Amino acid sequence: MERAEQAAVAAAMRETLRRYVPVIRGWTTPDGKLPDPYETVYSENYAPANAAAVLAAVCRAGDGDEAAGLLETMLARTTELLGDKSGVTPFCRVFLYHYGLMALLLAPEQDRIRLAGRFGKTLGAYEDDCPVVNTNCAALQWAMELFADALGLKKADPGLLQHRLAFIANAQLASGFINDEVTEQASHDGMPIAYHAFTLFLLASASAVIERWPDRLEPYRLEADDIVRKGMQWMRRSITPDGAFAMVERSGYQMFTWGALTALLAYTAPDGEYGATARDAYRNWLPYEHDDGTYGCTPNRLPHSLRVGFETYTHLNMYNLLGLTGIAVAERVLERGIRLPERPEGRLEAEGAPAFVDSDSGYAFYRDGAHFFGCTLRMHNRKYAPAMQGFHFRHAGRTLPIAEPRLSASRKFGGEADRDDVWEGCAATDEAGIVHVPDMTENVETAEAAGGLTMRFENDVLRCEKTIAIGDGGVTWTYVVEAKQPLKDVGHVLPLVVHDGRDALRIATGGDRELLLQTGLRRYALRYEGTGAPDMELNRSLLSVSGVSAKVRVRASGPLKAGGTVRWSVALVPLPDAQP
């Protein structure tokens, strides 16, 4: 971005932060607490510290006394919660300490001096007692050690800094992906994409908010930059031009990922080198603003109280403010004009072939111009999505009415009790009534195909070949299933978004094996070949971040003898938009 354009984007970010001050004021109780307006469980948590960071950024922009007064209130509450070691968990206190210190660094100098005079002794004396519970915890602890040093509260511990960076580096795969499901004792196959981005954001945020690095700390900044650089080479595969990135597993598409991506692109590739500009990322979540000034915690416009696509730990106050903290960091990067230095040999390799298959993380991405989708190669340990599951579909740069996947009770996946599950795939029922679904925890065989990816797996019951292809004509799922033992039937499910808080899905039968869909002005045909007639089930699910969803079910085959084969395909075809 040209300097003038960069300044305009930074100014827009400052305005977004400023407009949130009345929301914080409205949530603040007379005794200075910041509870969630919709929940009593896990209600306040670390929200005051992130509120302080947002308010500090507003104060830096010179926007009034109200933000300064609220900033002091939020820092007072942050230090109060830090002192409640019996009532506040160690990991929550890591967030409180990290973002409380960040708030002081973001504040204008005169406010920082005043607030450090009131809270500095308490913050300087605080001792972190949290073990490294995951990789983003290590990044939080690394950065807060540097924040305390930059504020002059206490010297950073070189041993701790080196240990936390080594921990993160060890969690980073050869491809650049950072696995968050790592502790001091074990590494698990979690691979949540959201926390890959969040960990990179935490490392980059130190460079954003610390203006002067003493020589003794410079090596740690350089090492963190190397981790970020390598991590962005993986992440660039997942970014789409609308300013979003493909996610599945824990915390996918929760609002904090918006701020994380915006700050990362501002720091590493603001001009779109990684698929979207920092401006694109910033604008991506703005349409999810509610009338009261809050934002959807997930990318839909449904009421917060319905918790559509929420994690158990997702709360409006925490995730709105954590997301906006990312915007505050992005604004600081743009305002300062800083950028991740390139390696001496220049930028790392270009993206290359349309298909990117990373067997270590268990993900693949396919991109052909403005057509895009991600895919799981296996079911990961927390079992948020099946194997061979497509996600983050973009056709000509536009979203499609396909609900992002999410499973509820994985141990019963495929059973009638799990009718709320949101997924696309085939389900085969054997003669004993057992439903067999793509729940493999080992990678499926994957290869690039014309316009997409072909995946194959085999077990004692069946062989399955599945191809996902995307092109100008839409998205097609093609299946070939061979029975290795007798099967009662083989079916297929596809989840559709029936309401995103703004538009309802209208559906009609277009023929024996065709459904006509319309959401807003966008129209589609859903066409089946080699199956029976499709029907959309009456059940509705709130699990997907996309909105309220329902599955279209179809029978691909009746009884199938051992050695028998069934083939079918499903195509979602965009039609010309309706007239307003």
Image (cartoon, rainbow, N blue to C red):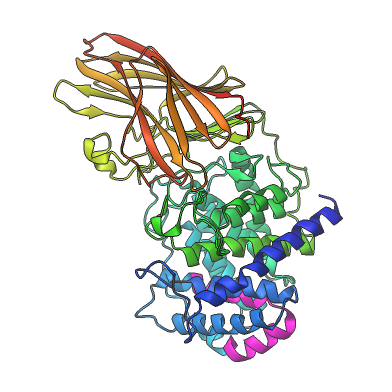
Find residue 295 and report its horizontal and vertical position in percent.
Answer: 55, 59
Looking at the picture, how far across and down is residue 91, in whole percent?
A: 43, 68
Q: Residue furthest front?
A: 580
Q: How many marks?
A: 0
Judge whether 495 appears above or below 428 on screen.
below
Q: Position of residue 459 (x, y in %)?
A: 28, 23
Looking at the rendering, which quadrant does residue 146 occupy?
bottom right
Instruction: Decide whether residue 111 is among the magenta residues.
Output: yes
Q: Is residue 468 left or right of residue 329?
A: left
What residue occupies the far left of the structure in this picture? Answer: 432
Residue 528 falls in image quadrant: top left
Query: Which residue: 57% across, 32% down?
Result: 522
Q: Nearer the viewer, residue 420 or 153?
A: 420
Q: Quadrant of residue 266?
A: bottom right
- Which residue corresponds to the image point at 43% horizontal and 73% vertical from the top-left? 44
Q: Main secondary structure of the magenta part?
A: helix
Residue sitting at x 60%, y 51%: 287
160 part of magenta stretch: no
Q: Does residue 538 sit above or below 26 in this rendering?
A: above
The answer to whether residue 220 of the structure is visible from this angle is no
* Quadrant where the C terminus is found in the figure: top right
Q: Residue at x 45, y 58 (%)?
A: 304
Taking depth in this image into account, of 482 and 9 the one nearest to the observer is 9
* 558 in relation to 290, above or below: above
x and y percentages locating residue 393 in the rendered image: 54, 33
Residue 172 visible: yes
> What stretch of residues is rendered in magenta?
95-120
Compared to 166, does 68 lie above or below?
below
